Amino acid sequence: MAGYLLDSNAIIYFFNGEKKIADLIEKTKDDLFVSFITKIEILAFEGADRAVQQKIEGFFNEIKIVLIDDGIIEKTIQYRKNTRLKIQDAIICATAKALGLTLVTADKSLSKKIKGIHIISPL
């Protein structure tokens, strides 16, 4: 499967007006995915006002949300054991790996910790 998996920080940068992230999202909007854990992280944040919250909810309604399955669970366990990533980062990386997606993240340290997935940081 070709496409892009957006990390939570990429979505935050997008809603804060980061042009490079916005350009990438606009160019690839038909091939965008987010993990269920990213949706939880973003929508559980209490700092956004109601108007921003509605924009974010609308954004999630327009892209594909990836739910967890046994393949993602197994890869998450491997990443967690081998790299000591936080569980949410392990889930996101495992999702990208399982689906063959490019991970879009501002966390440049992930490319040093995780091998076998394509990671870009358009900042």
Image (cartoon, grey):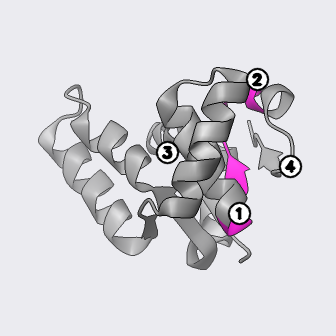
Q: Residue at x 58, y 43 (%)?
A: 76
* Mark 4 residue type: Gly
**Quadrant of the image containing the N terminus:** bottom right
Q: Is residue 114 above or below residue 58?
A: above
Taking the spot 23% from the left edge, 25% from the top edge, the residue there is 47
Question: In the rendered structure, which amino acid carries the disc numbered 2?
Answer: Ser
The residue lying toward the viewer, choosing from 32 and 72, is 72
| Circle number at residue 109 | 2
Q: Earlier in the sequence, mark 2 or mark 4?
A: 2
Q: Earlier in the sequence, mark 2 or mark 3?
A: 3
**Where does the C terminus fall, quadrant-wise?**
top right
Residue indicated by mark 1: 101
- The magenta-colored residue range is 99-110
Q: Of marks 1 and 4, which one's residue comes earlier in the chain?
A: 1
Q: CA distance from mark 3 to mark 4?
A: 23 Å
Whether tag 1 and tag 3 are in contact, CB under 8 A, the answer is: no
